[in-house]
Amino acid sequence: KLAPKEAEYHYKLGLALNEAGDPAATVAALEQAVKLDPGHAPAWYNLGLGYNALNRPGDALGALQRAGAADPASARIPYARATILLRLNRRDEAWQALRTTLALEPNHPQARGALQELGPN
């Protein structure tokens, strides 16, 4: 009610709802944020995490793809994609997402560990 047309308000509301443990409401708020501002990379990123929490991996990957397009310099986005792809046993795509993560942040410890576990591609 305070700022129905402000993407940032819905984004912050989504973060608060996530902290409160309400994944469905989190996703609803973040969906509104990206509807109002399709270039809001943090909202897309968190929406991807929210979809993943609701066991909607296809939607999660799509949201993370949008986040990556909006913020191509963020290493956390391809890393999040990699974790979902690994869970889906899409190893080649996960390997590429991990390589992208390391290209952006060469010392990313989780990406290094996951890539080492996957082995060469």
Image: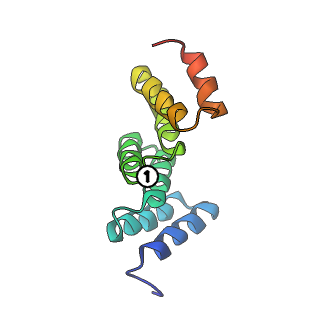
Q: How is the image coloured?
A: rainbow
Could you say which quadrant of the image residue 27 lies in?
Answer: bottom left
Crowd rating for badge 1 (residues with CA inside 10 Å; few <14, some 14–19, many 20+): some
Q: Quadrant of the N terminus?
A: bottom left
Q: Residue at x 56, y 22 (%)?
A: 115
Q: Position of residue 53 (x, y in %)?
A: 51, 47
- Judging depth in this view, the residue of 80 and 31 nearest the camera is 80
- Judging depth in this view, the residue of 9 and 22 nearest the camera is 9
- Judging depth in this view, the residue of 29 and 43 nearest the camera is 43
Q: Amino acid at mark 1?
A: Asp
Q: Is residue 82 left or right of residue 63?
A: right
Q: Residue at x 37, y 81 (%)?
A: 5
Q: Quadrant of the C terminus?
A: top left
Task: Report the number of discs.
Answer: 1
Q: Is residue 113 above or below residue 7?
A: above
Q: Position of residue 110 (x, y in %)?
A: 64, 32
Q: Which residue is mark 1?
A: 71
Q: Is residue 81 above or below residue 42?
A: above
Q: Position of residue 108 (x, y in %)?
A: 63, 34
Q: Is residue 93 above or below residue 80?
A: above
As drawn, the residue found furthest toward the bottom would be 2
Q: Position of residue 111 (x, y in %)?
A: 59, 30
As drawn, the residue found furthest toward the top would be 120
Q: Secondary structure at mark 1?
A: loop
